[in-house]
Amino acid sequence: MTAPSRYSCQEVVEKLDEYVDRALTSGEIASVEEHLQRCAECACEYRFESNLISEIRAKLRRIDLPPDLMSRISQMIREECDKEGE
Ligand SMILES: [Zn+2]
């Protein structure tokens, strides 16, 4: 049994969409969860993103969201979370 690998914030942010989508392996999920537990900023981003993404997807179920829209939303969320941390 191997301990989950430690992700950096960058790695977690990159995997957050897939995490919300449950598109990761169980090892990756464990690593993301481990990081979310000890990193308030990524936990904040995850909270926003999971709410937002499920809301958007519920409304636009049959439409593929353009990737640049999702990265702009992630950027917005990150700025919100940075503000919250001050
Ligand atoms: Zn982090």
Image (cartoon, rainbow, N blue to C red):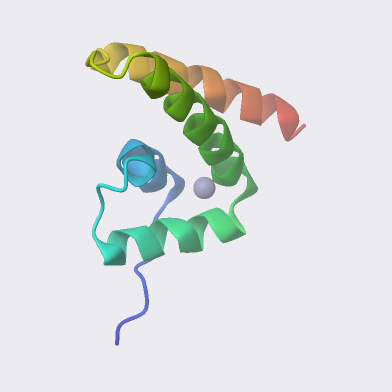
- Write the residue at 23% across / 59% down: 25
Where the C terminus falls, by quadrant? Answer: top right
Residue 62 horizontal/vertical position (percent): 23, 16
Nearer to us in this view, 62 or 75: 62
- Write the residue at 54% across / 24% down: 77
- Write the residue at 29% across / 87% down: 1
Residue 19 horizontal/vertical position (percent): 35, 46
- Write the residue at 30% across / 82% down: 2
In the picture shown, does residue 25 fall above or below 80?
A: below
The quadrant in which residue 26 appears is: bottom left
In the picture shown, does residue 60 fall above or below 14?
A: above
Nearer to us in this view, 22 or 83: 22
The quadrant in which residue 29 appears is: bottom left
Q: Residue furthest right?
A: 86
Nearer to us in this view, 55 or 41: 55
In the picture shown, does residue 5 fall above or below 65?
A: below
Q: Is residue 77 left or right of residue 68?
A: right
Q: Is residue 24 left or right of residue 69?
A: left
Q: Is residue 34 left or right of residue 83?
A: left
Residue 74 horizontal/vertical position (percent): 45, 24
Residue 44 horizontal/vertical position (percent): 61, 39
In the picture shown, does residue 80 fall above or below 26?
A: above
Number of callouts: 0
